[in-house]
Image: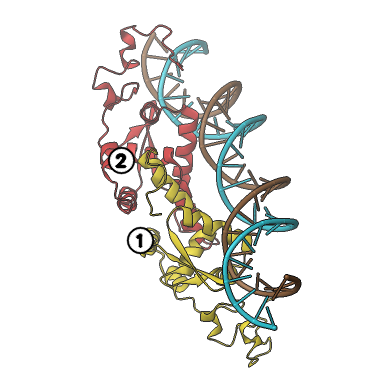
Chain colours: A yellow, B red, C brown, D cyan
Amino acid sequence: MQTNTSAPAEPPEATLASFFRLLGQPVRIHILLAIGRREVCVCHLEAVLGQRQAAISQHLMQLREAGLVVSERSGRHIYYRLSQPKWIDLMISAAAFFGETDWIAQALSLDPVPGCCCPECSATPICPRISETDPVREGTENKST
Amino acid sequence: MQTNTSAPAEPPEATLASFFRLLGQPVRIHILLAIGRREVCVCHLEAVLGQRQAAISQHLMQLREAGLVVSERSGRHIYYRLSQPKWIDLMISAAAFFGETDWIAQALSLDPVPGCCCPECSATPICPRISETDPVREGTENKST
DNA sequence: GTAGTACATTCGTCGCTACGAATATGTCGT
DNA sequence: ACGACATATTCGTAGCGACGAATGTACTAC
């Protein structure tokens, strides 16, 4: 399932356009940046993007079918990572054409997210679901609405 | 969109996504490549892309409003060129991620087109409208299927 | 086994967009 | 002036895509 398994009958400009169309949605750009150079679970993206699980999952499906991301199950969680780190580079260089790259660095450096349940976010005491077993904090992290 | 005086209310990822969405259409990629590093008129693009004039014009309007192309009238013709040649570079580098760049070089090297009426294409004897002094065209409206 | 969690998938709907048709605008030639 | 031409613009429509709701699937804990 690499990047070239689909539609070799497609003209190359259509292939390139499909790729650009994938990136033509802010939420998918955000997903790719939130994944960044590490592995994140869906609930992590859900917390970062503030979108419903189904929507996230649908975007991930498209990115997966396009070969931009790969997924791997680990217990109850499914971790996503970029199939190749060069997608980040492409977005950085594209953003550089507009003179703005700081926000990308910020998005890439996003770390543990309140509301996420994955072990990586649970390393901090802000994740309520993990801290059920270890109630160091009781819901002190209601930051918005 | 010139990313300047007015309209930074948009988050940067939306700006980038808008740019990618513009390139997410094969016909617009084709337009940009057909323009390439020179100036072409609309009838040229019409002949190259095989699309109706209105459709071409609408795509050009979007590319113009996004600041990717600029237009300049010269007599009855309006010539379009890329606002900056780096858009070509971006597409080449993006295509390189897929390992295919030959078709871009081919599209860029496209020269006079049969069916185009602009002076550049009329340098060759294949343009019928220029040869209207030589009335070979009677009812040659080839909306042939 | 059942219940609960994390995620995927299907379906329906709404909004956006690409295209065709028609019309308007600007330019040249007469 | 007028008509022909090149292009822009408006409008209507059809198709696609994004999202929500509901449901299905895989895994864990009990």
Q: In the figure, A64 relative to D10: above or below?
A: below
Q: Which residue is mark 2?
A: B36
Q: In the figure, B3 relative to A73: above or below?
A: above
Q: Residues within 10 Å of mark 2 (few under 14, many from 20)?
A: many
Classify mark 1: helix, strand or loop. Answer: helix
Tell me, yes or no, whether dots 2 and 1 are on the same chain: no
Q: Residues within 10 Å of mark 1 (few under 14, many from 20)?
A: some
Indicate the position of residue B123 as horizontal and vertical percent values.
24, 22
Left or right: where does residue A94 sit relative to residue A63?
left
Q: Nearer the viewer, residue B54 or A67?
A: A67
Q: Are marks 2 and 1 in contact (CB under 8 Å)?
A: no
**Residue B7 appears in view:** no
Q: Amino acid at mark 2?
A: Gly
Question: Which quarter of the picture shows residue A117?
Answer: bottom right
Work out how far the residue at label 2 is from the one at label 1, CA to CA, in angstroms.
Answer: 20 Å
Classify mark 2: helix, strand or loop. Answer: loop
**Residue A103 appears in view:** yes
Host chain of mark 1: A
Check residue B80 in the rendering and tell me which mark sits there, or answer none: none
Residue at 31% x, 36% y is: B39
Q: Which residue is mark 1?
A: A93
Host chain of mark 2: B
Residue at 26% x, 37% y is: B106
Residue at 36% x, 59% y is: A90
Residue at 62% x, 77% y is: A115
Indicate the position of residue A84 as horizontal and vertical percent values.
37, 63
Q: In the figure, B85 relative to B44: above or below?
A: below
